[in-house]
Amino acid sequence: MRYCSSPYLYQRRVTRPVTVGDPARGGVVIGGDQPVVRQSMITCDTMDTAASVRQTLDLVAVGCQLVRITAPTVKDAANLQNIVRELRAQGCEVPIVADIHFKPEAALEAARWVEKVRVNPGNYADSKKFAIKEYTDDQYEAELRRIEERFTPLVKLCRELGRAMRIGTNHGSLSDRIMNRFGDTPLGMVESALEFARIARANDYHNFVFSMKSSNPKVMIECYRLLVARLNELGPDWNYPVHLGVTEAGEGEDGRIKSAIGIGSLLCDGLGETIRVSLTEDSPNEIAVCRDLLAQISTLSLPASPLAPELAALAGQTDWPFDPFAFERRPTPEIELAGGVKCGAEQTVRVVVTQATWDKVAPKLRPRDDVRPEGVYEDLNVFEVDPTTDFEINCDTQLVTVRDGVKLPVITAFRLLVARLRRLGRNNPVLLKDCLDFAPGTLEPKIALLRASVNIGSLLADGIGDAILVRGEAGGGQSLRLAYNILQAAGCRSFKTDYVACPSCGRTLFNLQTVTAAIKARTDHLKGVKIAIMGCIVNGPGEMADADFGYVGGAPGKINLYVGKQPIKFNIPEGEAVDRLVDLIREHNKWVEPEPAGAN
């Protein structure tokens, strides 16, 4: 199976166009030959018409092309009529998307008023109770017939009214039926979406897109690759567009890095017709990141024409330098990097800095700092090669990298390097770089962050890389911190608390930004602990997937606490909930006291 024509060359996937609204009156076309569409979501109560209109206009003002609004009940869905009416009266023609979970009746009501409806097969006319049940083939087919009965009315209404639809599965929120047949896996996510797509197609409805979201960028990348590969297998008329996003990415630098790894990797491989960067911040901030990320793709990928002879030959090979559908770190021998620090084999991915960065950060290092250089590039024994030309290497214990000045994008260059090593029968450890045309201080910090995250994060998600070097960020301390944050976001290393935080919407039962800040203030010294902060039951417990602990809105002013996916404490007053979360972490032996200031 293939999800793109070549891992070395950019060629945008060919998809059918999906129309959302009237393009002559502010609507958009997703897919076809149209540019990638930017979208976001408002965060207020859907019953507050004035606030919904105001937040929508704020998003449109910064370039949002699709605005999503939650409709958790039929009453909320009915109020979409008032919101849309007021928007149109103010001259705003941006298409509105209704976000539906659990209630088919709300979807049917929403479709009367908005241009697009998003449904999640994991909880639309299906159950999610984390129940273990074995289904016979006959029972499974009976369940599919039941789902078809529930979903078909929405399909027919959308076809009749000319509405678009997103069939969006989320990691961790698959139905019990899918979980018991396929597990909480990329395959389960894809099959769940395809079941709904088959119902749509059986009713001659094709105006829909897919999404495969996860808070884990590696899982998200695998899901989309597998989806597109399966669509390719099903035939040329299954060329539906896809919406890209890393769900619950969080806030600040971490949220941007996670999103850049997941979305950027797929965009560089030619996938993705619409995107959302999900941040636990004010929604307009998401659009700025979308715009900046999209602007980098032409620089970070290699157009299919003209082809270098070596690339042309490799483009047609079926033996790729990595498995695109199942993450596996590339096997290498263990070697000494510097000063007794090992890399390769089972060692964690190491962080290398330039001599200039070392000179800046070394005087500030404290003995117990986790964020510290593990090698200086100029002092290492690194074999630098041009992967577009022949080279010889005599042993597997030589650290290898792409030399500066090679006229290839980073992702292409390192994938090609690994392919060449394989053809030589070598499995040398590889040092990844975020850029090959190093010019310190020439990039804005926000752009340096996005480029480094896409380049290094994409390769790490391919299983490539034993050490990394970030140079595009000019600041010494900032570049070092960025390298560690990329490793954490890519799931390669854990040096701090990992947070999974949803971006807020009208379903949210507390102020996510305030609560996230409060939880971070108490817990950000913990290492190897993942905490999910979810505004409502829709985004928890399922969608927090592999978090150790969960803080989930259960009712207005009330919080439920989870250990993994298991609810432990219910209806805790919000004013006490952060303290109770800390108590829960302590009870499970994951708590350590923060060190006093200056302890190092």
Image (spheres, rainbow, N blue to C red):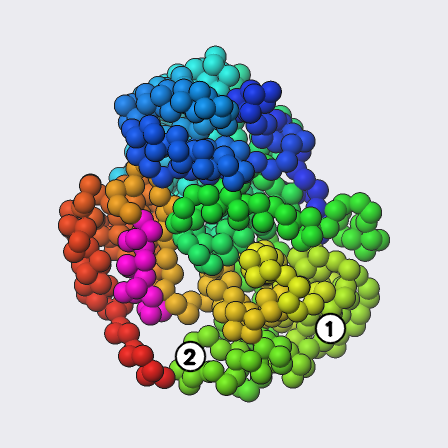
* Image-quadrant location for residue 453: bottom right
Q: Residues within 10 Å of mark 2 (few under 14, many from 20)?
A: few
Q: Secondary structure at mark 1?
A: strand
In this view, the residue farthest toward the front is 90
Rate crowding at label 1 as few (under 14), some (14 to 19) or many (20 or more) other CA atoms within 10 Å. few
**Amino acid marked by disc 2:** Asp
Residue 107 in the image: x percent, y percent? 36, 23
Q: Which residue is mark 1?
A: 384
Quarter assignment of residue 366: bottom left
511 vs 26, left or right, is left
Residue at the image position 66 percent from the left and 57 percent from the top = 411
Q: Establish if 466 lies above or below 381.
A: above
Dots 1, 2 in contact, CB < 8 A: no
Q: Position of residue 529 (x, y in %)?
A: 34, 64
User: Which residue is located at x 33 percent, y 28 percent?
Assistant: 49
For residue 128, which numbered disc appears in the image? none
Q: Position of residue 325 (x, y in %)?
A: 55, 49
